[in-house]
Image (cartoon, grey):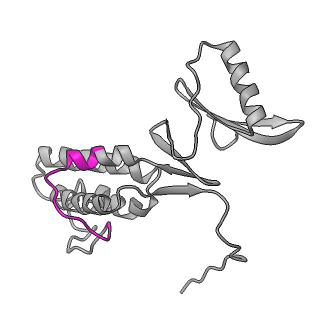
Amino acid sequence: METDANVWVLCAGGSPCGALSVYVDDLLVAAPEGLLEEVLKHLQGLWECSPPDHLVEGGTLRYAGFELSKQGDSIFVHQSSYTQEVLTKAHHVTGESEVPCVRDDFSEDSPPAVALDPAKVKEAQGLAGELLWLSNRTRADIAFAVARVSHAISRNPDIAIQRAHQVIRYLRRFPRLGLKYGKPPCDYGGHMEYQF
């Protein structure tokens, strides 16, 4: 695939009908049942492979740090286990929040603090990294808030940590959000964008 060197489009009779994704030594195949079995048989002829896991209704399949769940005709992609790890690690951050980001008095244009505490910078960087892993993969709802965390690290790590804790409170309130792929529930009839 031109956009991702780790994804190949599977074709039958010259028409695309599935996809194969490779992550280190894990493979994910999405295809109609007959083609799926044919691809798996071919791969097992090339390499010694463990028995494949199949995505079934009510089950969860783990791949490349993602969790995939089948919900009717849709697939729900999330990172609930990783989110729980982040929340467990941040057990000292109390409370929940309905929003990932709140207004604060810190200006992004403020000059950096005179003497940055290396331990605080490292803590802020660690929190930002954990949250980026979520926001870049399945949690677009926290992307702006995480960008604000990252932006403050080298100017005021205490503010960055406060912002990260706000995101963690939001994750505690909504730990199982993700991306749902499937048919839209209705025909929206188009898209319009307004700019003011």
Residue 55 drawn at (x, y percent): 58, 39
- What residue is at 22 percent from the left and 46 percent from the top? 88
Residue 195 drawn at (x, y percent): 56, 83
Q: Which residue is the extreme one toward the right? A: 13
Q: Which of 64 and 133 is in front in this view?
A: 64
Numbered disc total: 0
Residue 162 in magenta?
A: no
In the visual, does 160 lie left or right of 76? left
Compared with 37, 76 (above or below) is below
- What residue is at 40 percent from the left and 55 percent from the top? 176
Compared with 98, 93 (above or below) is above
Compared with 97, 139 (above or below) is above
Residue 134 drawn at (x, y percent): 40, 50
- What residue is at 49 percent from the left and 36 percent from the top? 64
In the visual, does 67 lie left or right of 119? right
In the visual, does 13 lie left or right of 157? right
Q: Which residue is the extreme one toward the bottom? A: 196
Q: Which of 138 and 84 is in front in this view?
A: 84
Can you say which quadrant of the picture contains the N terminus?
top right
Residue 186 drawn at (x, y percent): 68, 72
Q: What stretch is highlighted in magenta?
A: 85-100
- The quarter holding residue 72 reads bottom right
Q: Can residue 111 be seen in this view?
A: yes
Q: Can residue 125 be seen in this view?
A: no
- The quarter holding residue 145 reads bottom left
Magenta stretch, overall SS:
loop
- What residue is at 52 percent from the left and 56 percent from the top? 179
Compared with 44, 132 (above or below) is below
